[in-house]
């Protein structure tokens, strides 16, 4: 069972992201009820690129449109000890049939689109047709593969019918926001990519589009028809795209913007020392790594990859690059996830052990120049990363020095993000220093299952282990999370033994927010997890 599009956040985040506690609690109450009114200004690098969520291909667009178009349920940030749970959203309740093949949602009868039309089961069914349409080729359409049909039972009841029982049925049914059938249904899917959706926004979320000047300013205002009485508290939320993190920090410190997501660790102390600001940190769902191209002859031997990992001082990377705001990564499942194999430990920094493994693999310094060779060929590698990310360039330099100490030549090369993607897709690389942002749905298949030649895959390194393939197939067929857990444990053991990646560090997310903004629960479910409950202190200077 494929779940490649579940890596949407993962794939979109690998390019430009910089990068313990749990989700940050809301700030202490100020003594009175939340104030209604006011504006919060959010600074960021990106902008909304499409107002149709099923044409979105970037994380900024997905997150902002989630405030405009509702979801059936709201995923909670409680995936550490068990799979994530869900709270009511557009649906007030849901129930799985006795045979596990039908999931029925009851919609909130108060829900209205911003033009006054009720939100109905037909909107949900129309959304499903859009999600599955091959013309649109929605990036997350694989989440709907096991859903046979979505049928309105009555105006406020809708039933999903599945072809099998599996653990992620609720998550798959909930994937993707609900869109308005009455406003969009008359436009053939074949024309959707040619439509200006900015002129057709009809909201049923807490906010509605007020104005948008691309790459300058986006304004969402309170949706007056929102069915949760009294919410949101804010009059409007403003996004201002800025060209750099330096610009973001400067405007945060002057009070021109209220929030910066993904703060550079080097700026954390300055923010924490400012009484007008609040610094929030929590484990990100991301890890940095070096992806070794197993198609390269010098990297095909597992002993070589194990040696490269032992030769790299990952604690130095954490201290120097992340300024201590990270922890060693172990394997393909984050240590904060319920499915993590807690019997695994990070490999040690062991240059002597690395030299022994390289010698076992036949690499020796035959000419005394300090570099290893075999059959007249030097053990040399190119470390590729994207030029937009200073942290990854710093990692390359540290890794270059570490590997030189065990006789391996590593040459950093920095290229523009699009060029890096093209090189990776073509398999034209030795090693890539990059990162993944992991979805809360544990699905290791897209990265680690063998892929037939010519088939699109995220397994760009050519990793292939028949036992891992067998276990991945078994995990995909498991009916419950309890059945999956021991399978996931064994998969992690095998991948860590193979070392197709050197897993470097699991990072922290740093968010800076103006202290006048109250009620915000900042966590990695979404930066805007409870935005409808945010409010601002209206008295006093900003």
Image (cartoon, rainbow, N blue to C red):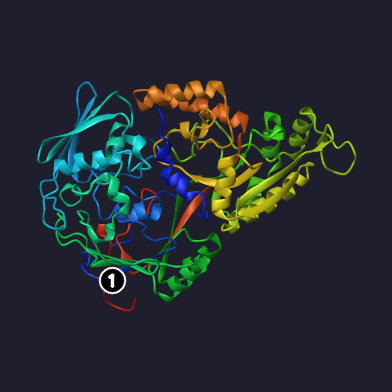
Left-right relation of 510 to 113: right
- Vertical arrangement, residue 270 with respect to residue 92, above or below: below
Residues 36 and 305: in front is 305
- Vertical arrangement, residue 49 with respect to residue 101, above or below: below
| SS for callout 1 | loop
- Residue corresponding to mark 1: 537
Residues 221 and 453: in front is 453
Residue at 68% across, 43% down? 312
Quadrant placement of the N terminus: top left
| In the image, farthest residue toward the right | 367
- Vertical arrangement, residue 304 with respect to residue 136, above or below: above
Quadrant placement of the C terminus: bottom left
Please state the horizontal and vertical placement of residue 380, each as a whole percent of the image: 75, 42
Please state the horizontal and vertical placement of residue 164, each as a whole percent of the image: 29, 23
Please state the horizontal and vertical placement of residue 220, each as a whole percent of the image: 27, 64
Residue at 52% across, 29% down? 451
């Amino acid at each position: 069972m494929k779940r490649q599009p579940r890596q949407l956040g993962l794939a979109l985040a690998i390019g430009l992201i910089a990068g313990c506690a749990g989700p940050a609690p809301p700030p202490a109450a100020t003594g009175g009820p939340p104030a209604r009114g006011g504006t919060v200004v959010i600074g960021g690098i990106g902008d909304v690129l499409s107002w149709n969520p099923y044409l979105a291909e970037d994380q900024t667009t997905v997150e902002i449109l989630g405030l405009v178009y509702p979801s059936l349920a709201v995923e909670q940030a409680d995936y550490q000890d068990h799979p994530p749970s869900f709270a009511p959203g557009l649906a007030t309740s849901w129930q799985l049939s006795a045979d596990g093949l039908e999931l029925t949602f009851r919609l909130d009868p108060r829900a209205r689109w911003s033009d006054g039309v009720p939100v109905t089961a037909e909107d949900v069914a129309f959304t499903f047709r859009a999600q599955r349409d091959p013309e649109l080729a929605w990036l997350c359409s694989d989440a709907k593969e096991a859903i046979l049909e979505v049928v309105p039972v009555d105006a406020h009841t809708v039933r999903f019918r599945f072809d099998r029982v599996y653990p992620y049925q609720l998550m798959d049914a909930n994937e993707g926001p609900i869109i308005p059938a009455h406003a969009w249904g008359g436009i053939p899917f074949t024309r959707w990519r040619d439509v200006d959706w900015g002129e057709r926004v009809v909201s049923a979320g807490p906010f509605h589009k007020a104005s948008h000047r691309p790459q300058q300013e986006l304004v969402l205002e309170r949706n007056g028809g929102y069915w949760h009485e009294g919410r949101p508290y804010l009059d409007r939320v403003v996004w201002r795209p800025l060209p750099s993190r330096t610009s973001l920090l400067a405007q945060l410190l002057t009070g021109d913007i209220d929030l910066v997501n993904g703060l550079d660790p080097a700026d954390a102390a300055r923010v924490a020392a400012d009484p007008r600001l609040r610094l929030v940190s929590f484990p990100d769902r991301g890890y940095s790594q070096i992806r070794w191209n197993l198609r390269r002859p010098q990297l095909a031997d597992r002993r070589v990859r194990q040696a490269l990992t032992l030769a790299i001082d990952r604690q130095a990377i954490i201290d120097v690059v992340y300024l201590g705001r990270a922890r060693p990564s172990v394997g393909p499942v984050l240590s904060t996830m319920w499915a993590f194999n807690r019997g695994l430990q990070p490999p040690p920094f062991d240059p002597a052990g690395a030299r022994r493994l390289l010698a076992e693999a036949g690499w020796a310094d035959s000419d005394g120049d300090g570099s290893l060779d075999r059959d007249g060929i030097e053990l040399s590698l190119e470390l590729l990363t994207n030029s937009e990310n200073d942290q990854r360039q710093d990692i390359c330099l540290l890794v270059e020095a570490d590997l030189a100490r065990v006789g391996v030549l590593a040459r950093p090369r920095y290229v523009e993000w699009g060029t890096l993607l093209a090189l990776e897709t073509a398999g034209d690389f030795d090693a890539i220093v990059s990162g993944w942002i992991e979805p809360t749905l544990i699905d290791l298949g897209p990265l680690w299952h063998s892929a037939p030649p010519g088939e699109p895959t995220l397994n760009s390194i050519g990793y292939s282990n028949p036992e891992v393939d067998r276990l991945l197939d078994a995990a995909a067929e498991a009916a419950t999370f309890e059945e999956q857990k021991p399978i996931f444990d064994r998969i992690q053991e095998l991948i860590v033994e193979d070392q197709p990646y050197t897993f470097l560090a699991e990072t922290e997310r740093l968010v800076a927010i103006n202290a006048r903004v109250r009620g915000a629960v900042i966590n990695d479910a979404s930066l805007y997890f409870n935005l409808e409950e945010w409010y601002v202190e209206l008295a006093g200077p900003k």
